[in-house]
Image (tube, rainbow, N blue to C red):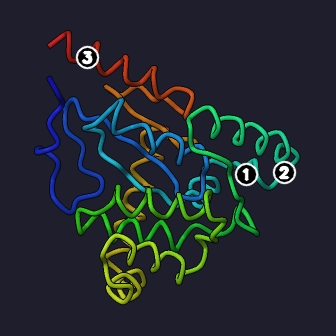
Amino acid sequence: MRISRATRCAGDPVSRTSGEVDFFFGAMSPYSWFAAERINTLLPDAVWRPLYAGALFKENERRSWGLDDRRVAGIADCEARARSHGLGPIHWPDPWPSNDLIVARGMTFADRRSRLPELALTAMRMAFREGRDLGELAVVAEAAERIGIDADELKRPVAEPQIKDDLRATNDQAISLGVLGVPTVIVDHELYWGDDRLDEAAAACTRQLDQR
């Protein structure tokens, strides 16, 4: 038995329903990439919710590990995890991390087109396999073209008020639910923060279904 996605309100990035599993992630985060590559197997009905991680960090008075003295250890850990997940060597963008606002808006646009997982995975693979900077609109537009969306279809909407409002609403919802970082999966109001907690979240979802 699966949790149905059908009850999600189309075009509403903050609507939540009973029993829903939410996957909050940021495209600039390698740990989000690891989780995104596995979540369709472990939690196939999770609702993908793209965040502007920069704003999330600011709201929670936190800083990316890639910008402080945790960077060297974090990069080593990510490269080890990528190998363990069978994702191959990471080719880090230069610079990394950069501003993730554009890619977050691009993913929000893709969500309204029901193409979010495709664009998100393509963009993250471009970042961490090809070393492409997702802070550049041209790179995000190329990711859209790779999944069959014309680049201009993405470039225009990312600056539109509706996309900005939708992204802000998703960030606000994440903050209201207690999300501190990405990736975070929420199952039955319980938060599982980190790629290393994805299996735990899947187990919690299975227990939830068994209790119905």
Q: Are marks 3 and 2 in contact (CB under 8 Å)?
A: no
| Label 2 – label 1 distance at C-alpha | 8 Å
- Up the image or down, 94 lies above or below 16; here it is below
Q: How many labels does the image show?
A: 3
Residue at 48% x, 38% y is 184
Report crowding for label 3: few under 14, some 14 to 19, many 20 or more residues within 10 A (C-alpha).
some
Q: Is mark 3 on a helix, strand or loop?
A: helix
Which of the two discs, 3 and 2, labels the residue nearer the N terminus? 2
Along the polypeptide, which appears first: circle 1 or circle 3? 1
Instruction: Name the residue beneath numbered marker 1.
Output: 63
Camera-side residue: 145 or 98? Answer: 145
Query: Looking at this rendering, what residue extends furthest in the top direction?
Result: 211
Residue at the image position 57 percent from the left and 28 percent from the top: 196
In the figure, 3 relative to 46: above or below? above
Q: Is mark 2 on a helix, strand or loop?
A: loop
- Looking at this view, is 177 or 117 the one in front? 117
Label 1 environment density (alpha carbons within 10 Å; few <14, some 14–19, many ≥20):
some
Q: Which amino acid does label 2 sit on?
A: Asp
